Amino acid sequence: MTHVLVAGGGIGGLAAALGQARGGHRVTVLEGRPEFSEIGAGIQLAANAFHALGALGVRDRVTGRADFIDELRFMDGTSGQRVAAMELTGAYRTRFGGPYAVVHRGDLHRALLDGCREAGVELLAGHRVTGYRQDGARVTALTAAGERFSADVLVGADGLRSAVRARLVGDGGPRISGHTIFRSVIPMDEVPPELRSRSVTLWAGPGWHFVHYPIGGGAFLNLAATRDDGAREEITGAPASRSHVLTRFPGLCDDARELLELGRDWRIWVLCDRDPVDGWVDGRVALLGDAAHPMLQYAAQGACMALEDAVVLARLLRCEPYEIPGRLVAYNALRRDRTARTTLTARRMGDELYHAAGAGAASRNAMLSGLSPEELREAVAWLHGSTSFTEAPEAVLVRAEGA
Ligand code: FAD
């Protein structure tokens, strides 16, 4: 039986572990924190994520905890003009074979964790991986406490500052985007009824944007306001005062400002990503999720990509007749272009759509408002509509070998 070690028990690591365990492998997850948990608020999941969750056998659990979204609304944040809206119910679901939803990160993480427990995954918290060694037959993960864990495969799913990536790619720290995000969650009963909707609403302004959507069965409203302020230091979850947040978004139109003013207990993150790289595989070691391809959240696809990675890797590691390093090379080849395109698209969405100013904003409004519902769906079809990652493993492996 193949033994798979996974470094990191976030959404990507647990999805990878679940996929491997369902494939009949022995799986051990080494999580650096003292317990398996996920912080933060809501996370958007497009139809591609639901295909991946289906392949991992936990789609129903996540669906049961999700808030389904009726439309993605793009608003001009200074004039208040509704620029475009993509309907996410009938035609979206028919075309892409799945819904668009928001879930609490903790709920998604718990669904994967419960799936792992039921599938017999060994879950070891408090084990921070610092690096690895390998020979032709085994790979050994080294931990901060000086322990060694040996297996047939090591999956580095240890996030943005991955220790496995540091050893494998060695490309230093992540790129600090210069964008700061302020996040808050407020009870929905504090939101004026006329400002409530089952939508993800984005207000775009010069150098900033503000997104909100319902979570928790509609009991809460998730607020996320981002400013291109040239921040140079990484910040993760530091508190911010309400007055500080309000001064960062001058020019916000009345409806959006009313919602921003409701926020409290704000927390700050400075967003990071990395330039795409060609290779995330070294012999028996492969990267997955943010460790492989961290991206800005502007396409709302980082976790979706991690789930897709997990499905592809699980399918390839089931292809027993092939050597493990070859299967990992195939995984890398199959995931590289799609994740690179998503990373670069997310950057461009921030610069060209969300933060455009002056004539750029006018031209963006004209372009987006001229798109028909079908054209809007077509624009995201490559991302939300792809199911190539759920293909039969042999076909995938043969195609990758021939590529
Ligand atoms: P992580 O979530 O970072 O998990 C890594 C895990 O590894 C953690 O548990 C960590 O404790 C552990 N770890 C770290 N180092 C070590 C080590 N050395 N040894 C062992 N364990 C270690 N994506 C979407 O799809 N939709 C969205 O709407 C969306 N919104 C976002 C909003 C914001 C503000 C941000 C910042 C991101 C957003 N994303 C979104 C992206 C998404 O959050 C990430 O892509 C996803 O969480 C990556 O999961 P991961 O498991 O690869 O990494």
Image (tube, rainbow, N blue to C red):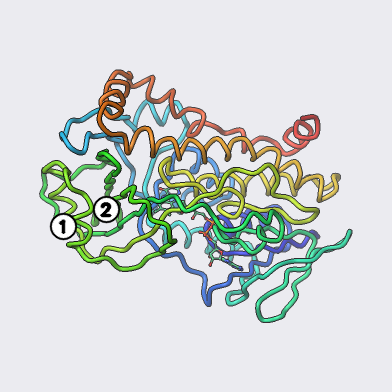
Q: Label 1 belongs to which residue?
A: 262
Quadrant of the snapshot with the C terminus: top right
Rendered residue at 13%/43% (across/down): 255
The x and y percentages for residue 319 are 79, 45
Secondary element type, mark 1: helix
Rendered residue at 76%/31% (across/down): 399
Rendered residue at 62%/38% (across/down): 390
Q: Quadrant of residue 39?
A: bottom left
Q: Quadrant of residue 234?
A: bottom left
- 299 or 151, nearer to the observer: 299
CB-based contact (under 8 Å), mark 1 and mark 2:
yes
Q: Which mark is residue 223?
A: 2
Figure check: 46 above or below 386: below
Secondary element type, mark 2: strand
Instruction: Name the amino acid, label 2.
Output: Leu
The x and y percentages for residue 360 are 31, 28
Q: Quadrant of residue 240?
A: bottom left
Give how far apart the Cα atoms at labels 1 and 2 are.
9 Å
